[in-house]
Image (spheres, grey):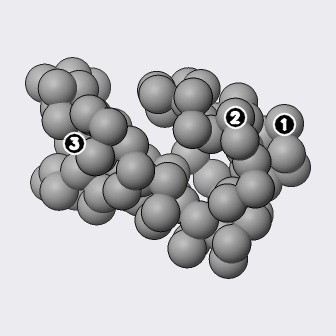
Amino acid sequence: MFREKDLNEIIERSLELKKGTISSGNEDWHSLWDSLGHLSILVNLDQALEGKCSKITELSQATSITAIKEVLKANNLMTD
């Protein structure tokens, strides 16, 4: 099952961040989460979850890690 660590790694890869940036608590990377970054996150997330995200419309509005986690959990794609 998909975990928070997996999500963080996808976001880091999608936004071209150094590994561990998100878990470090440094929030300087937030400015990189623009519409193109969001699209990259969604594409990489869909690939990681074998196409299970492409039909979840709520993900297009989920513009934070917390929001993405909530949507994934609601759709039984992520554990606590």
Q: Secondary structure at mark 1?
A: helix
How far separated are the C-alphas under marks 1 and 3? 26 Å
Write the residue at 85% across / 45% down: 75
Q: What residue is shown with label 1?
A: 74
Q: Nearer the viewer, mark 2 or mark 1?
A: 2
Residue 47 in percent (x, y) is at 55, 73
Residue 57 in view here: yes
Instruction: Name the disc covering residue 58, or none.
Output: 2
Quadrant for the C terminus in the image: top right
Tally the marks.
3
Q: Nearer the viewer, residue 54 or 22?
A: 54
Residue 15 in the image, given as x and y percentages of width and height: 23, 50
Q: What whole-number distance in Å separates the C-alpha atoms at marks 2 and 3? A: 26 Å
Q: Which residue is mark 3?
A: 21
Contact between labelled residues 1 and 2, with CB atoms less than 8 Å apart:
yes
Front-lying residue, 54 or 44: 54
